[in-house]
Image (cartoon, coloured by chain):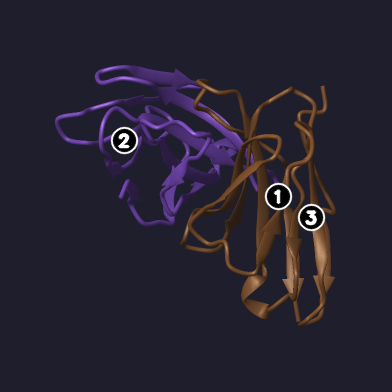
Chain colours: A purple, B brown
Amino acid sequence: GDSVTQMEGPVTLSEEAFLTINCTYTATGYPSLFWYVQYPGEGLQLLLKATKADDKGSNKGFEATYRKETTSFHLEKGSVQVSDSAVYFCALSPSSNTGKLIFGQGTTLQVKP
Amino acid sequence: NAGVTQTPKFQVLKTGQSMTLQCAQDMNHEYMSWYRQDPGMGLRLIHYSVGAGITDQGEVPNGYNVSRSTTEDFPLRLLSAAPSQTSVYFCASSLPGARELFFGEGSRLTVL
């Protein structure tokens, strides 16, 4: 079945460092891919998305490119801030699209001043 | 707009007790779903619904019941709580074809 694998955390970076969180997926057909962010004590918010191969999603300085050849959707940011400290989830929506998402295990990011 | 509203935010139960987690959305979304979040396991789908009167099981449905009598509401019932059901529960909704989900703020349940 469809699945998502994220790099294990926690990831600890200094402010202004470059961030990469790896995400790979297994899916049939043409899934959509997402990154969600969960700030401490809050629910999940959509960070960015990509609906087809080679699409690049971007928001708040974060980017991710839908790579079908490598089945990847890695999250990147050029310069992280303390306020980016959160848990990041990679997720896919299967081709069948019945309102379900399949999530990776989440990666905790801590940014130190 | 309130979006997706979950109640209660926190609940402590004893083993064997029953309870209902409420979820309501005011966006006229047809699709609704329940997930549980456990450390190191991401979010796992419990039950989902594609419209009023239609529900189906997700990855981890055992011990939970759902029903969908209206488009707005999708309650999750724990029939006989067990410590393994200690978790944070999220309700989500979406429009058909939209793919992305809108989440509530979560309900933290502890079963002693």
- Of helix, strand and loop, which one carries label 3? strand
Q: In this view, does B39 lie to the left or right of B63?
A: left
SS for dot 2: loop
Crowdedness of circle 3 by 10 Å Cα count: few (<14), some, many (20+)? many
Residue B29 vs A11, above or below: the answer is above
Measured in 3D between alpha carbons, the distance from the residue under mark 3 to the one under mark 1, in whole angstroms, is 18 Å
Identify the chain of the residue marked 2, using the numbered disc in the image. Answer: A
Task: Tell me the subunit letter for badge 3.
Answer: B
Which residue is pictured at 31% across the width and 19% down the height? Answer: A52
**Which residue lies under the disc numbered 3?**
B21
Tag shown at residue A74: 2
Q: Where is residue B32 in the image (x, y as percent from the top left)?
A: 64, 38
Q: What is the C-alpha distance between the residues marked 1 and 2?
A: 25 Å
Foreground residue among A108 and B78: B78
Is the residue marked by circle 2 packed among few (<14), some (14-19), or many (20+) residues within 10 Å? some
The type of residue carrying mark 1 is: Gly
Q: Which of A89 and B14 is in front in this view?
A: B14
Query: The residue under label 3 is which amino acid type?
Result: Leu
Residue that appears at 48% across and 40% down: A101
Whether discs 1 and 2 lie on one chain: the answer is: yes
